[in-house]
Amino acid sequence: MKIVFFGSSRSSLHCLRLLSSAGLDVELIITQPDRKAGRGNKITQNPLKKFALENNTPILQPHKIRKNPEALEKLKQIKPDLNVIVSYGQFIPASIIYLPKYNSINLHFSLLPKYRGASPVQWAILKGEEKTGVSIFELNKNMDEGPVYAQKEVPIQADDNAAELESHLAHIGAELLIITINKIPGLKLRPQDHAKATYAPLIKKQDGRICWENSSVSIHRQARAFYPWPSTFTFLQDKRLKIIKGKPFEKKSGLNYQPGEIIEISRMGIKVCCGYSNSYLIEELQPENKREMSAYAFSLGAKLQTGDIFS
């Protein structure tokens, strides 16, 4: 079966590697253009591009695939049996969706119709879900609304962050993709129940800012959901601090602290008052323009004291 693979993230790279190792014939890789990233704002090679070059697989990197006749013409020349999409990041036009013999399938990191959209892993953690999963569905012109081929449920561990959970889902999703592709001529599609749909809109940088008036559980979910991007952050004397790791305490302190106030500093970390008289222990953090470090080590260097306030 001839496949054209669409993807741009490290999760999609993992899926591509497993598909190739399973002997599936990937004729073309379509991915996002290389972009500037990091402190030096240097051009960073797309993770799938390196794979394509190492394996002598043709690659296209259109800025907007909807307006790129070269991509459509290349697919017509290949005459693929199937398009496989995993975290590609662009809308794909109907002229490409329905070109292959078996159309196009998408691996989505949720149990559709729950969490349709760009950030399903993050929103599942933010909402406190105990489980999520992967769905393989047939692409159509609407966002994540196509009929489903296969799904698999996955539990969310109490301290999973978004990076860990997405990596786990990518591994399970890749295995399910291989099974689905090999059986696709005989599989039946199941329509989604649109009345049960929920949505996972795109995460923005400002979404990571902590509101210390929230509960410690809510802040803990935020820190997990936004690692490694856009990160959860707070400010101390106008200096931005990324929160890397911590844990919530729901027990009321019994003392009159204000949200954001440092209650205690120990080798375990920095305990901060939250809303509802809860507290949150910051265990690891990253000061602005510095490396990640333990919260206790930071407290010594910054000469923090109880009563100092994170804004």
Image: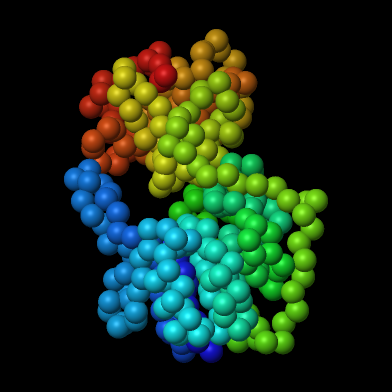
| Quadrant for the C terminus in the image | top left
Task: Give the number of callouts.
Answer: 0
Q: Nearer the viewer, residue 220 or 111?
A: 111
Q: Nearer the viewer, residue 35 or 240?
A: 35
Residue for point 75% across, 79% down = 188
Which picture quadrant has residue 251? top right
Q: Where 12 falls versus 295 (above or below)?
A: below
250 relative to 48 in the view: left or right: right
Is residue 298 at least partly visible in the picture? yes
Image coordinates for residue 194, horizontal then vertical, percent: 77, 54
Residue 180 drawn at (x, y percent): 63, 80
User: Picture quarter containing residue 230?
Assistant: top left
Q: Quadrant of residue 269?
A: top left
Q: Residue at x 41, y 20 (%)?
A: 310
Q: Residue furthest toward the top?
A: 256
Colour theme: rainbow
Residue 16 image point, x, y percent:
44, 75
- 216, above or below 238, in the image: below
Q: Residue at x 69, y 64 (%)?
A: 146
Residue in the picture at 51% in, 24% down = 211
- Residue 214 in the image: above or below residue 244: above
Instruction: Determine if residue 158 is in view.
Output: no
